[in-house]
Every structure is written in structure tokens, then in C-alpha cells.
Image (cartoon, rainbow, N blue to C red):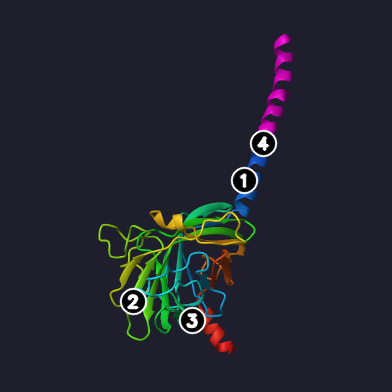
């Protein structure tokens, strides 16, 4: 009798435990399925952009002027704002800016990023003043530093937006219009380095992506560093910064910028975004922007 009773009570208890385990597994599968549905896989890759000459892309030398004597023994410091436009990278169509996402991401997630291609120029020449002769016109080209990589991070969310921050070390190439004389100011070189140093490797493989077509051999010079000020309302050049081994980068940030999976099945940014800081701005647009703007006109 005891054996029969024990069997009668044991089977319902075991059945109840089995039912409970089954429900837990079912809930677990449901939660996992929902999690996967909300997650997007984005492989590592390059994002290509075009920069229009609409005045939204610029570099302002106000806080860290090109120093006196840079363009010649009697040249004065230059502290103007230089509007920029894109110059196509070789073999890249109209693309002038390439940002590489180094890691694959399951959203929400983050990846390191690096600018591997940059080619901009001044929309108009700048005017350089001298203490003993008339001013001169110089054109400006902007590429990537030969000494410091321009890197940052990108956080990609499930809601179709991303945040990014890029530390950019630009290289400015100035060309005098009258005779083609060239000066280079590399912000990644600091006060102790010049563009002619053979002991330093370039941050980007030029055989893969060249910043722009070859130019005349430049006269290299160390770059002044950006001002370091707690109060950005009163910008001033910090003379002590020029003694550092490299200059502070231009930090470009983008917040809540849109992304989507485009027709090619890849991560893409569907409309122009503007990344900017106090003294610089880069209005980057998807490929085809320039042709579309030309048709509208």
C-alpha cells in the first residue's frame, strides 16, 4: 500500500516539474527571439562621403594661428577662417572623405573608427600679410597628418541613430599662387617633427588611399598647437603648447545622426551629417550628393 501511494504522488510531482521546465525554456526562447529581432549585425567597413562647397565645411585658425614667419621671414600670423570643399580622392569618384569602421557591431554596440582618406581645399585663396611688402594669395589643401592617425569611436544604436567622436590631425599644404611655392603645416608633427622626417612612418598607407595628387616638394615646418583654454569664450594661443611633441587634434563629434540599411544591404548614412567643434566643421554627404545638387541647379 505504501509503495502504491508513493507512486501515485510521485508522478504528478514529476509531471509538474517537467511542465515548469518546459515553460522556462519556452520563455527563454521567446526572449532570445525578441532580442535577436531587435539586433542588427553591421560588418566592419568603409563609409564614403562627398564634401560640398556650401560653406558648412571650414577650419578656423583663430585659436592657433599660423605663426609669424611661416610664409616668409616677414609674414604676419594668419588667424582667418578658411571655407573648404572636397577634392575627389584618386579612383574614388567624387568621394573625398573615407571613414573606416574597424570592428563588426551587433546593435547596440560600438566600434573604433579612423579617417583613412581626406582631401579638401580652400574655396578661395587666403590672403597672407607681410610687414614689408604687399599681401600674397595662397591656396590651401587639407589632408591627413603624416605622423598621427586620426581615430575615434562610433556607437551605433538600435533606434537608427549613431554617435561618433573623431580626433583629427589635419595636414595643411599652402601653395603661393604667384610662383607655386609650397609650405606644409602638419598638426600631428608637433614642434620637433617635420614632414621630411624619414624615421617616422605615415599613419595611413598611401598606396591604399592617397589624400590627393602629388604636389611640388614642400618646405616643411612644425605646426602650432591649438589653444588649451578652460573658458572657450575667450580663446587665446597658449605659447607653452608649442613645445609639446604633438598638437591637440580637432575633435569632431556627431550626435543622433541617422543610419539605415540601404539598397546594397549595407550600413549607410542616408542624408548629410555635419560634424563640428568650436573651430572646425565638416559637412559630409553620401556619394552622389554633388551630382544630385548639380541636377537641381
User: Sequence order check: which comes first, mark 2 or mark 3?
Assistant: 3
User: Sequence order check: which comes first, mark 3 or mark 4?
Assistant: 4
**Residue at point 32%, 85% (across, down):** 179
**Cα–Cα gap, marks 4 and 1:** 12 Å
Q: Residue furthest bottom?
A: 297
Q: In the figure, 107 relative to 145: above or below? A: above
Residue at numbered disc 1: 32
Q: Main secondary structure of the magenta part?
A: helix
**Cα–Cα gap, marks 2 and 3:** 18 Å
Identify the magenta region.
1-24
Residue 102 visible in the snapshot:
no
Residue 172 at x, y percent in the picture: 41, 70
Q: Is residue 176 left or right of residue 151?
A: left
Residue 8 part of the magenta segment: yes
Q: Quadrant of the C terminus?
A: bottom right
User: Sequence order check: which comes first, mark 4 or mark 1?
Assistant: 4
Q: In the figure, 245 relative to 261: above or below? A: above
**Cα–Cα gap, marks 2 and 4:** 72 Å
Residue 190 part of the magenta segment: no
Counting every numbered tag in the picture gives 4
User: Sequence order check: which comes first, mark 2 or mark 1?
Assistant: 1
Residue at numbered disc 2: 182
User: Sequence order check: which comes first, mark 3 or mark 1?
Assistant: 1
Residue 19 at x, y percent in the picture: 69, 32
**Cα–Cα gap, marks 3 and 4:** 65 Å
Residue at numbered disc 3: 123
Q: Is residue 264 left or right of residue 144?
A: right
- Secondary structure at badge 3 equals loop
- Secondary structure at badge 4 equals helix
Q: Residues within 10 Å of mark 3 (few under 14, many from 20)?
A: some
Amino acid at each position: 500500500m505504501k509503495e502504491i501511494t508513493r507512486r501515485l504522488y510521485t508522478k504528478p510531482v514529476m509531471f509538474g516539474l517537467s511542465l515548469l521546465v518546459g515553460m522556462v525554456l519556452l520563455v527563454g526562447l521567446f526572449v532570445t527571439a525578441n532580442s535577436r529581432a531587435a539586433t542588427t549585425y553591421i560588418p566592419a567597413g568603409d563609409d564614403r562621403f562627398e564634401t560640398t562647397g556650401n560653406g558648412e565645411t571650414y577650419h578656423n585658425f583663430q585659436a592657433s594661428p599660423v605663426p609669424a614667419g611661416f610664409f616668409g621671414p616677414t609674414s604676419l600670423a594668419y588667424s582667418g577662417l578658411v571655407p573648404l570643399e572636397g577634392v575627389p580622392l584618386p579612383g574614388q569618384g567624387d568621394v573625398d572623405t573615407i571613414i573606416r569602421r574597424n570592428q563588426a557591431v551587433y546593435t547596440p554596440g560600438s566600434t573604433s573608427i579612423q579617417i583613412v582618406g581626406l582631401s579638401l581645399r580652400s574655396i578661395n585663396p587666403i590672403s597672407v600679410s607681410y610687414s614689408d611688402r604687399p599681401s600674397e594669395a595662397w591656396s590651401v589643401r587639407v589632408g591627413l597628418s603624416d605622423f598621427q592617425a586620426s581615430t575615434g569611436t562610433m556607437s551605433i544604436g538600435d533606434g537608427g541613430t549613431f554617435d561618433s567622436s573623431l580626433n583629427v590631425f589635419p595636414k595643411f599644404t599652402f601653395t603661393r599662387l604667384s610662383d607655386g611655392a609650397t609650405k606644409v603645416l602638419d598638426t600631428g608633427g608637433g614642434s620637433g617633427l617635420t614632414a621630411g622626417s624619414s624615421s617616422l612612418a605615415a599613419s595611413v598607407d598611401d598606396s591604399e588611399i592617397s589624400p590627393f595628387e602629388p604636389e611640388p616638394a614642400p618646405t616643411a615646418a612644425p605646426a602650432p598647437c591649438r589653444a588649451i583654454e578652460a573658458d572657450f569664450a575667450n580663446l587665446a594661443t597658449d605659447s607653452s603648447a608649442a613645445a609639446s611633441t604633438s598638437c591637440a587634434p580637432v575633435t569632431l563629434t556627431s550626435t543622433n545622426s541617422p543610419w539605415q540599411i540601404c539598397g546594397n544591404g549595407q550600413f549607410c548614412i542616408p542624408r548629410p551629417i555635419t560634424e563640428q567643434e568650436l573651430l572646425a566643421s565638416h559637412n559630409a554627404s553620401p556619394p552622389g550628393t554633388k551630382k544630385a545638387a548639380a541636377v537641381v541647379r
